[in-house]
């Protein structure tokens, strides 16, 4: 008897909130219409600007107006559909009290762990531990906030809380492929969930949420199950998600940002183990682009090579040649000047000419 | 005869509909969800699970809820 009274009190509260929801629908329609009017006003402004630009012959400005118009028109389409969505909802009365009591009774019959907290204004249902594709995610609590039911058209009325969290390695807030920050992305169940809540079909609501939690949609998860444990960098072990993980095609392993680099020649991602530093410019080079100097044997990038020798060797070769030339010239000069260093004839001797002084 | 049909699949809706006398749950499911597999749904009549040969009666409330629904990132 006491239990029945308790259920009636809760049902009464739900009924009040759902009656408020029906009134809030009109407020929400007005709110969404306001947003639509703002967009239409923006369209007027863009239209005026475009007219002005055409008159003044500002072609570039006119083109910019076209881009803006396209954006605003898209936003108007979106805003219109948002208004239609709620305007088209059929007029419904709030559910009867006995129906809500029956819902609560069914809820307790169907789910083992139901917690109704009247002071907090919440109804919570715990799921069984969930495992998807061999990834253990643990049990979840679906917590419906009765007060929020009246704001169903503008915000979510429930949270999905991990009881024994096993979040994605790379995102602590993602406790389920479709739950982030306790918010469930309803996907295909979105409309059915909203209608179930509007009608006060609590049991259907909890069943639908449970069905989503028990299903994995590989096309659109917050974190895919294949990356749930994260991708460990082969070098340092750091766990990273697929966006921040780099594959080295040379050793065919995954690396974090710190342990991978880019080949300066071909832009190929290469791990720091497979990459070589150019001995001249110190940039990273992949094994395909690395060159070996035939002179000194050092590793260089293509840009720092002249044919088959590195720039350093080429430079020192040039210097050597220059020095040799200088030495040869000096030697020749020294030989020429030996008999009489002050002789004017000797100083004026050029290569190929017969030194006059030696003729004697 | 008239029954309340609650379909929690897709858009979800609840409405009173007319059906032929002596329609079983299995026949009803085949008519309404022709391309679907009954094993992927929880079917309840008057909030209770029923067998497939249960014959629907006037005023019954039948609920069809999918057991697998794909969530998504909005």
Image (cartoon, grey):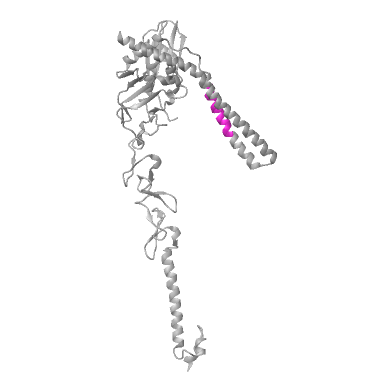
**What secondary structure predominates along the stretch shown in magenta?**
helix
Q: Is residue A32 visible?
A: yes
A332 lies left or right of A108: right
Which quadrant would residue A173 be assigned to in this image?
Answer: top left
Q: Residue at the spot x=45%, y=74% of the render?
A: A322
Q: Position of residue A105 (x, y in %)?
A: 34, 12
Q: Which of these two is toward me, A181 or B65?
A: A181
Q: Residue at the spot x=63%, y=41% of the render?
A: A61
Which quadrant would residue A72 be assigned to in this image?
Answer: top right
Q: Position of residue A56 (x, y in %)?
A: 69, 41
Q: Is residue B66 visible?
A: no
Which quadrant would residue A234 be assigned to in this image?
Answer: top left
Q: Residue furthest toward the bottom?
A: A360
The relative height of residue B67 versus residue A179 in the rendered view (above or below) is: above
What span is colored magenta in the figure? A70-84
The relative height of residue B4 versus residue A59 in the rendered view (above or below) is: above
Quadrant assignment for the N terminus of chain A? top left
Query: Is residue A75 located in the magenta-colored stretch of the structure?
Result: yes
| Number of numbered markers | 0
Q: Position of residue B29 (x, y in %)?
A: 41, 14
Q: Which of these two is toward me, A295 or A335?
A: A335
Query: Is residue A47 located in the magenta-colored stretch of the structure?
Result: no
Q: Residue furthest toward the front?
A: A119
Q: Residue at the spot x=47%, y=12% of the render?
A: A93
A257 lies left or right of A347: left
Q: Which of these two is toward me, A67 or A252?
A: A67
Q: Position of residue A59 (x, y in %)?
A: 65, 42
Q: Which of these two is toward me, A330 or A5?
A: A5
């Amino acid at each position: 008897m006491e239990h029945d009274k308790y259920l009636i009190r809760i049902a009464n509260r739900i009924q009040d909130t759902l009656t408020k929801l029906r009134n809030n629908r009109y407020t929400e329609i007005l709110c969404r219409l306001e947003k639509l009017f703002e967009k239409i006003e923006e369209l007027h402004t863009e239209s005026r600007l475009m007219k002005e630009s055409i008159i003044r012959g500002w072609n570039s400005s006119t083109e910019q107006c076209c881009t803006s118009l396209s954006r605003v028109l898209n936003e108007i389409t979106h805003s219109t559909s948002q208004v239609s969505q709620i305007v088209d909802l059929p007029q419904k009365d709030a559910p009867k009290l006995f129906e809500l009591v029956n819902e609560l009774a069914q809820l307790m019959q169907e789910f083992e762990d139901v917690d109704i907290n009247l002071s907090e204004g919440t109804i919570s249902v715990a799921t069984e531990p969930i495992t998807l594709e061999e990834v253990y995610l643990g049990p979840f609590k679906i917590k419906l906030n009765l007060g929020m039911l009246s704001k169903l058209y503008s915000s979510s009325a429930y949270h999905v809380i991990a009881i024994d969290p096993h979040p994605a390695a790379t995102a602590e807030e993602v406790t389920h492929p479709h739950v982030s920050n306790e918010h469930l992305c309803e996907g295909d169940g979105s409309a059915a969930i909203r209608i179930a809540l509007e009608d006060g079909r609590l049991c259907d609501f909890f069943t639908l949420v449970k069905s989503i939690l028990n299903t994995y949609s590989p096309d659109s998860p917050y974190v895919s199950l294949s990356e749930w444990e994260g991708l460990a960098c082969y070098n340092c072990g750091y766990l990273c998600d697929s966006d921040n993980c780099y594959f080295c095609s040379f050793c065919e392993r995954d690396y974090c940002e710190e342990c991978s680099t880019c080949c300066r020649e071909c832009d190929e991602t290469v791990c720091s183990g497979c990459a070589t530093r150019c001995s001249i410019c110190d940039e990273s080079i992949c094994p395909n682009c690395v060159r070996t100097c035939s002179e000194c044997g050092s590793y260089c990038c293509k840009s720092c090579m002249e044919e088959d020798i590195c720039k350093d060797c080429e430079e020192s070769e040039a210097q050597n040649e220059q020095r040799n030339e200088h030495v040869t010239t000096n030697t020749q000069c020294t030989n020429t000047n030996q008999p009489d260093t002050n002789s004017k004839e000797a100083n004026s001797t050029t290569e190929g000419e017969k030194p006059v002084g030696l003729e004697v | 005869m008239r029954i309340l049909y609650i379909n929690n699949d897709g858009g979800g809706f609840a409405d009173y509909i007319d059906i032929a006398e002596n329609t079983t749950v299995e026949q009803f499911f085949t008519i309404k969800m022709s391309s679907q597999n009954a094993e992927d749904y929880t079917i309840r009549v008057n909030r209770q699970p029923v067998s497939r040969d249960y014959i629907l009666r006037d005023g019954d409330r039948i609920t069809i809820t999918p057991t697998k629904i794909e969530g998504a990132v909005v």
